[in-house]
């Protein structure tokens, strides 16, 4: 009789365990999607803000250097135009792009090179209030 009692008690326990697992899995998946979306939005916004600052910086300096005839300014313009091309080719709409971080690092390096040639000391900051580039 004890074997039959044990089996009858194991049935409901097993059923509740399975139902609890399923419910927990569904809730966890839903919360994971929400958290992942928030994380992606936050980090995408940071990258977009950073690239936008580089782009604005580059466009401003293109206007300032336009028409300069010195050889030194010619080198600055080449690096500047290279940075602009890199920014324009950056895959803003494809977060699954496998070389996204490599391209972002190249843009950062080109930006630093340009700042060195221009003899400016940028201070790019990302905070809760927004981002900014100061000198």
Image (cartoon, rainbow, N blue to C red):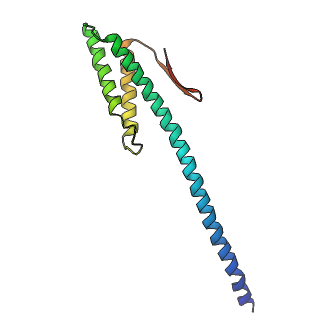
Name the residue rendered at 27%, 15% in the picture.
Answer: 75
Name the image quarter holding residue 68.
top left
Residue 21 sits above or below residue 111 on the image: below
Left or right: residue 122 compared with residue 16 = left
Name the image quarter holding residue 111.
top left
Name the image quarter holding residue 74.
top left
Name the residue rendered at 63%, 71% in the picture.
Answer: 18
Left or right: residue 24 compared with residue 5 = left
Residue 83 sits above or below residue 102 on the image: above
Labels in figure, total: 0
Which residue, as the protein is rendered here, is positioned at the far bottom?
Answer: 1
Residue 47 sits above or below residue 66 on the image: below
Quarter of the image with the N terminus is: bottom right
Residue 131 sits above or below residue 34 on the image: above
| x and y, in percent, of residue 49 in the image | 47, 29
| x and y, in percent, of residue 102 in the image | 37, 36
| x and y, in percent, of residue 57 in the image | 41, 19
| x and y, in percent, of residue 54 in the image | 41, 24
Left or right: residue 9 compared with residue 108 = right
């Amino acid at each position: 009789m004890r074997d039959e009692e044990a089996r009858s008690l194991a049935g409901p326990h097993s059923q509740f365990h399975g139902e609890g697992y399923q419910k927990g899995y569904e809730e966890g998946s839903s919360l994971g999607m929400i958290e992942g979306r928030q994380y992606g939005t936050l980090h995408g916004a940071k990258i977009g803000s950073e690239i936008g600052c580089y782009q604005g910086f580059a466009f401003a300096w293109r206007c300032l250097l336009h028409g300069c005839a010195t050889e030194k300014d010619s080198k600055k313009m080449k690096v500047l135009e290279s940075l602009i091309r890199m920014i324009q080719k950056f895959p803003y709409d494809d977060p699954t792009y496998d070389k996204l971080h490599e391209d972002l690092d190249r843009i950062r390096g080109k930006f630093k090179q340009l700042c060195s040639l221009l003899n400016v000391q940028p201070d790019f900051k990302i905070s809760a209030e927004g981002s900014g580039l100061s000198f």
